[in-house]
């Protein structure tokens, strides 16, 4: 695999997978920030599922984060340490070294998902996130993707294809894609809730921050204090910062593939 092909495929994968997470799992499925045709909804959902676990699990955890932001019940909060909020919460540790090792493992999240699925099959764990997704549970695709071992199977397909295309280099490529995608998503929970970074223009009562220098790697999700103020807003960078996810949603709207974009009343009617 030449370096150029490696890089181009990498950029394509991290952008597609990243938008599956930010436009799909987050703004569309969790917060219902806009509406779109079923095929577009399914496309973003499948892109998010390539690395983020089942959509109902992700959405349930994230809705809990908004309901209990930085309180005891918040699944990931830097009140228990920066690295716990980043990746430690997934393996139940506050130890920074363990959390960093897990964050760099790339495929660690897939191992956690596999363990959850096996526990569900053995009856020692329930999919308790389903109660937080009464809307999604009505959709066949969401129920299918939430079945035990479907996400691990999807990951195995990625491993098999990467190996078939480029052998060891293909697996290395897949690892770097997963390292980037997981850490960019987790950094919203850690960096964008950490008091030392960015600013808090809205008194939301939690630790959320707007961190403009993280906007590129988070597709605009780093305007996180604005997001906590207006969770349903399709646009997170409300005052004009870089927000690729919003640009994509606006582009879909112009193509007739998205509608009913929700914005705070104070930000409706603009051309942005
Ligand atoms: Zn948050
Ligand atoms: Zn959110």
Image: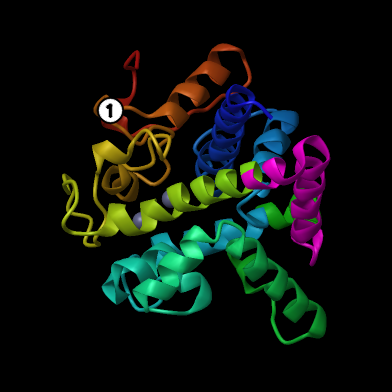
Q: Residue at x 63, y 70 (%)?
A: 112
Name above or below for residue 58 compared with residue 252.
below
What kind of colouring is applied to the model shown? rainbow
Q: Is residue 58 visible?
A: yes
Specify whether 97 is left or right of 110. left
Q: Position of residue 134 (x, y in %)?
A: 65, 59
Q: Position of residue 1 (x, y in %)?
A: 69, 30
Element on which disc 1 rests: loop
* Quadrant housing residue 196: bottom left
Residue at the outermost bottom position: 124
Q: Is residue 48 visible?
A: no
Name above or below for residue 127 compared with residue 52.
below
Q: Residue at x 57, y 19 (%)?
A: 252
Specify whether 41 is left or right of 150. left
Q: Position of residue 51 (x, y in %)?
A: 63, 50
Is 164 inside the magenta-drawn segment? yes
Q: Nearer the viewer, residue 251 or 119?
A: 119
Q: Residue at x 77, y 76 (%)?
A: 118
Whether the residue under disc 1 has CB within 8 Å of ligand 2: no
Q: Which residues are magenta?
A: 146-172
* Quadrant housing residue 4: top right
Specify whether 192 is left or right of 48. left
Q: Which residue is mark 1?
A: 241
Mark 1 Cα shell of 10 Å, populated few (<14), some (14-19), many (≥20):
some
Name above or below for residue 177 compared with residue 240.
below
Q: Position of residue 171 (x, y in %)?
A: 69, 47
Q: Main secondary structure of the magenta part?
A: helix
Q: Nearer the viewer, residue 11 or 222?
A: 11
Quadrant occupied by the C terminus: top left
Q: Nearer the viewer, residue 171 or 88?
A: 171
Is 160 inside the magenta-drawn segment? yes
């Amino acid at each position: 695999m030449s370096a150029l092909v490696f890089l181009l495929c990498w950029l394509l994968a991290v952008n597609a997978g990243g938008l599956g997470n930010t436009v799909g799992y987050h703004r569309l499925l969790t917060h219902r920030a806009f509406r779109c045709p079923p095929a577009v909804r399914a496309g973003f959902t499948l892109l998010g599922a390539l690395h983020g676990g089942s959509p109902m699990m992700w959405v349930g955890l994230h809705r809990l984060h908004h309901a209990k932001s930085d309180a005891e019940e918040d699944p990931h909060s830097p009140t228990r340490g920066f690295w716990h909020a980043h990746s430690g919460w997934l393996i139940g540790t506050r130890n920074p070294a363990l959390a960093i090792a897990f964050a760099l493992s790339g495929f660690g999240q897939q191992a956690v998902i596999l363990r959850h699925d096996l526990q569900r099959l053995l009856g020692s764990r329930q999919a308790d996130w389903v109660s937080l997704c009464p809307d999604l549970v009505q959709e066949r695709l969401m129920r299918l993707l939430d079945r035990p071992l479907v996400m691990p199977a999807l990951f195995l397909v990625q491993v098999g294809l990467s190996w078939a295309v480029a052998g060891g280099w293909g697996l290395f490529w897949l690892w770097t894609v997963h390292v980037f995608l997981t850490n960019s998503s987790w950094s919203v929970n850690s960096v964008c809730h950490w008091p030392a970074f960015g600013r808090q223009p809205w008194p939301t009562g939690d630790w959320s921050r707007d961190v403009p220098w993280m906007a590129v790697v988070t597709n605009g999700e780093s305007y996180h204090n604005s997001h906590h103020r207006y969770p349903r807003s399709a646009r997170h960078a409300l005052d004009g910062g870089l927000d690729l996810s919003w640009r994509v949603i606006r582009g879909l709207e112009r193509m007739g593939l998205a509608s009913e974009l929700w914005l705070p009343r104070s930000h409706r009617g603009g051309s942005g």
